[in-house]
Amino acid sequence: MEKETFDILILIGRPASGKSEIIDLLTRSPADVRCSRFHVGELNILDDFPMLWAWFEEDLILSHKLGLSRLHTDEHGYFNNPGLWHLLIERLSLDYSKHLRDNPDYHLRITALIEFSRGSEHGGYAGAFTHLSDQILQKAGIIYVNVSFEESLRKNHRRYNPDRPDSILEHGLPDEKMERLYRYNDWTQIAPQEHGFLGVRGWQIPYAVFENEDDVTTDKPDLMADRLAMVLGKLWEMRIPG
């Protein structure tokens, strides 16, 4: 009997594009609906934001409480070494490998969902994908949530809760960082079609674009679900068996 759910989904897009809301929808969906409508199993979310935020917190403790040098970022919150962006992707790959090691039947019921965002300033998606493991690339499908930079900026303002800066659904970035890090990205250069295959180290990874300039991920659960079902349905048709 053919398995009915994705093994791995890679969910990418600009900050505040709607990625977290899509994950929230999938997480809240009943298991049978999640499987039959979206081809998604029990979710295991691998997100680089908690790791990134932990680095910010560690640097704050080191510099303000312990009187020591910061490890990851400068006083303005920018990485000391741009290679740290790639380290985050390597960490996601490592975490995934540990799940497989500890549970040989991991994908019988679980869909791993890998989430991140990358701008051209720190290597873009082309750079990030080269740091994903072969274990991931051979099984993955990609969803790119497409919004303009202006829409990303608007929603970044809307969702930001200064009392919960570490929250997945309520974190935000200052405008200066949004401008520098995320105004430009390379997605349309490496994946110019609405759907297709992205070549990385010899692997051909199917991708599909979730258009969200009209913001169906904010207070429009039915429209969001319909669009997500359409995008994931296309991606399911394109998947490479095995």
Image (cartoon, rainbow, N blue to C red):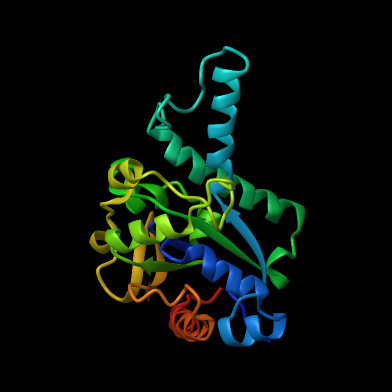
Total marks in image: 0
Residue 3 seen by the camera: no
Residue at (38%, 43%) from the top-left corner? Answer: 174
> What is the x, y in percent for residue 15?
41, 55
Tell me if residue 51 comes above or below residue 117 in the rendering. above
Q: Nearer the viewer, residue 45 or 162?
A: 162
Tell me if residue 2 comes above or below residue 158 in the rendering. below
Tell me if residue 51 comes above or below residue 29 in the rendering. above
Q: Is residue 41 left or right of residue 198?
A: right
Residue 60 seen by the camera: yes
> What is the x, y in percent for residue 200?
37, 57
Q: Is residue 94 left or right of residue 210?
A: right
* The quarter of the displayed image where residue 31 is located: bottom right
The C terminus: image quadrant: bottom right
Residue at (28%, 64%) from the top-left corner? Answer: 148
Q: Is residue 53 left or right of residue 187?
A: right
Tell me if residue 150 comes above or below residue 57 in the rendering. below
Q: Is residue 50 left or right of residue 233?
A: right
* The quarter of the displayed image where residue 53 is located: top right
Residue at (43%, 83%) from the top-left corner? Answer: 234
The N terminus: image quadrant: bottom right
> What is the x, y in percent for residue 238?
43, 80
Residue at (43%, 40%) from the top-left corner? Answer: 85
